[in-house]
Image (cartoon, rainbow, N blue to C red):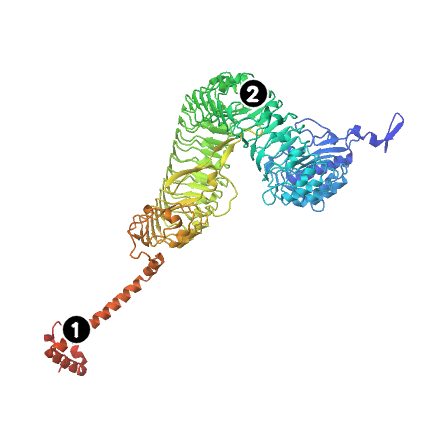
Amino acid sequence: MARCFNNKCFPWTMFQGLFGCLDKERKALLQLKHAFISGLNISKSLEWGDEEGGKVDDNDCCAWRVVKCNPSTGRVTHLLINQTRWWYYADPYDLSYFNLNASLFLPFEDLQYLDLSGSHIGGWIHNTGFEQLARLEKLEFLDLSYNNFNNTMLPSLGALTSLKTLSLRSNNFSGSFDIEELANLINLEVLDLSGNHLNDSFSLQGLCELKKLRELNIGYNNFGVTTSTLLPPCFNNLTFLRRIDLSSNQFKGNIPSFITTHTSLEHILLGDNKFSGSFSFSNFVNHSNLQVIDLGGNKLEVEAEHPHQVPTCFQLKELYLRNCTLLSGVVSRFLSSQYDLRVLDLSSTNLKGTFPTWILNNNTKLQQLNLGNNLLNGHFHLVSVYPKIAVVDISDNHIEGQLQANIGEVLPNLIFLNLAGNSIDGGIPSSIGNMSILWALDLSNNKLTGEIPKYLARGCTELSVLILSNNRLHGEIFPSYFNLTRLDNNLFKGTLRDGLSKCTELFNLDISNNQISGRIPSWITNFSSQLMTLFMQDNHFQGEIPTEIGQLKLLEFLDLSGNRLSGTLPSSLLMLQKLKYVKLQRNEFAGSLPVTLLNNSSSSLLALDMSYNNFSGSIPSMISELSELRVLSLKRNTLNGPIPYQLCQLKKIRLMVLSHNTFSGTIPQCFSNLNFGSKDDTENLFQDSVIPYSIGNMGYKSVTLEEVEFTTKRRADSYKGDILNYMSGLDLSCNRLTGKFPFEIGNLHGIRALNFSHNHLTGSIPKTFSKLRNIESLDLSCNRLNGTIPSELTELNSLAVFSVAHNNLSAKTPDFKKQFATFDSSSYEGNPLLCGPPLLKKCTKDEESSDDLVHAETQNESGIDVVFSTSFVVSYIMSLLGLMTILYVNPYWRRMWFISLKHAFIHPMALLPMFCTRGIDYIYLLP
């Protein structure tokens, strides 16, 4: 077909680029769009034009935002159908994965660039696999990251021989990755396999066939876990490499040799592995192009360079050495020749001396400086102005003295400042208010005094995180000009003023451990859009919890413990569907346990602590709805009734504390069906949680969000952070429980602490308790137990505390060996019939084993019968011998005896009166 202008005709294809995209490709795009709409189940109309409201020509697909065309031919060359396309239509976390028809891309014959990242693709429709894209001979860039592809798609990738860039980041590839399938990609220059579950280091040898590879990213996998912990030697052949990322794997040993021999390398990222040994920057003396080095999170020792081997041929932009050890204790010498640094992380490197101001002077472009967790001392004082610096972290050192008054002028563009964990005293300089873009300020755990300056609150308009915990600050908290967040462990007093109500973007509020009084204000609902953590514990709040708290829809952590709150809990708690941790202990709440909280369909609730209150009545049956619960503490209330069997439906429970109540009845047998650490649980749900403020790779604040009190080993301890992932226990002490121990309790193989003390339990100690192989504390004291202590308990090798004191136990104590050799007499006192070490009372037979005693006890009744029979026979024989002796000595009695016998043979009944009277004079002979 031709088109004519001024009597001249030209082929139509010469004008296609002037008049828009090809109709064939426009229709193909519409089909592709429909496939995504139906696959993602998006109800809203999906627009690939200008989503921000601008008008585009629906017929000209080259004007669509997801498309780029060749301006000459009008053919589609780029498709950008990535995750940002879906944010307008649905929450990406609510979208499910779907299978896509790969043949839908075939009409785009000139396609060079295809970005499908984050598009929720789970695979390809059967018989429409990705191998068909081999017909797209110009395709050079393919991004499939953040989808759900797995190992089954690898064979189809090998057909795409034209590819130069391939990203499979954050998919579902796992185990042994057959990288030989990628060997055909002879033109590949960039390969990203990071963020998967790959673990076979041997399979990495296949990458050595990719001779043109310039960038390789295999970070955030599990390489080095199951097979070789080293990289294959053939990596030395990848001489074109410019960027290598091995971070966050399990590689061990020395740093790979190719790192120091490939002088063309620009980015070396080896962080968060298990590399060890010594290392010197003199190894990079010939790396003239080096820009970024990340060796942090390994076990490396950084040597001081020889003065003649200090590398000066390169200028780094970023250097990360966190958690490495500077053997000299000072900053590496080569840094004195670096003038182009943007990021420097020397945290946790054993750095000593005063603050190295010369680093800031040398590197005028420096933006991020992290020297936290070292041994720096002296003052933090800057003379010059550093307008480029945005992040400074010198936390957890030994910095002392006061902050300079003009700190806000010398660091005017700070976004993040962390000076926590030092010995800084004096007041907070008001010049900090000049840091107009300051987003996070942490001055906690110092010796600061005085009040919070007003200008700080008014000037720092972007401030989202303020942490002043554990200082000596005082004064009124939250006046009308405040816009701040975390001020726990100070001496603030007064009531909550409405100044805080203006902080509508708060995601964390911590005012714990102060002296704030009054009621919790109803304007707390102003935080409903962002607030995730609310810590108000250990103050003097009183009254009831406002019903408006139910509007904090994103709330995950709620801690109101240690106040004077009273009344019943509001029904609006039912609306907090994201709650994970609830701590209401040490208040004055009364009434029955809150059905509204327990009926929260709280599959998300992990920990519930309502101990030390005045709750009464029984435990509601709907507690079984808390299917994800790991910690339950109802200690020291006035709860009564039997322990409900519904507790046995909390299959994931690890700590259960019901002590110091008035529960009655027996111990439910079904407790043996609970987890209590018996099953493998790989989830680390309790840990030092990270308050999510960060800048780049720095600035995370680790805080303990959950703490649980549990009585074990004869003392009440608080378990918090990561230790909660390993602690498991059941505490039913100080109640009115009766009956015998269910032998099924012995099936709790993973439990670490059991406390049944101070009840009215009877019967013997089950031998099945010997199967509690992880038990560390077992307290059965102050009950009414009888029988013997099973000798099998000596096989409990983890047992550290054991008490059966004040019961009715008898016989010999367990053999004084293994763990039982560590227990003193207090473990057995109050059992009068017990004997053997460590008690002073010795058993009757020193060598008598406890097994013999058990046998003797079981034969006790038959022994009594034998003794009675024996004594009767002996008495009868003795009486008979005595009678015969009398008859032999006395003739008269002998004659009378024989006369009686004669009559007895004739009249057998004649002797009957003889057995009923006392003397021979009353014997009446029958005629």
Q: Are marks 2 and 1 in contact (CB under 8 Å)?
A: no
Say which residue appears at 57% left-offset and 31% top-offset.
302
Using residue 419 as the reference point, say whether residue 9 is left or right of it: right
Secondary element at image label 2: helix
In depth, the one of 831 and 692 nearer the eye is 831
Q: Residue 368 location in percent, x, y?
A: 57, 25
Instruction: Kindly tell me whether residue 45 is visible in this rendering.
Output: no
Up the image or down, 417 lies above or below 813; here it is above
Would you call the spot at circle 1 few (<14 residues within 10 Å), some (14-19), or many (20 or more)?
Answer: few
Which amino acid type corresponds to the residue marked 1 in the rendered image? Gly
Q: Residue 787 location in percent, x, y?
A: 33, 55
In depth, the one of 422 and 602 nearer the eye is 422
Which amino acid type corresponds to the residue marked 2 in the rendered image? Trp
Q: Quadrant of residue 308?
A: top right
Query: For the residues marked 2 and 1, what is the alpha-carbon distance in whole angstroms?
Result: 119 Å
Question: So how many labels did they put on this image?
Answer: 2
In depth, the one of 281 and 494 nearer the eye is 281
Instruction: Kindly tell me whether residue 102 is visible in this rendering.
Output: yes
In depth, the one of 925 and 345 nearer the eye is 345
The quarter of the rendered structure image containing the C terminus is: bottom left
Secondary element at image label 1: helix
Using residue 624 as the reference point, say whether residue 639 is left or right of it: left
The quarter of the rendered structure image containing the N terminus is: top right
Up the image or down, 149 lies above or below 887; here it is above
Q: For marks 2 and 1, give the one nearer the viewer.
A: 2
**Residue named by callout 1:** 882
Mark seen at residue 358: 2
Up the image or down, 700 lies above or below 760; here it is above
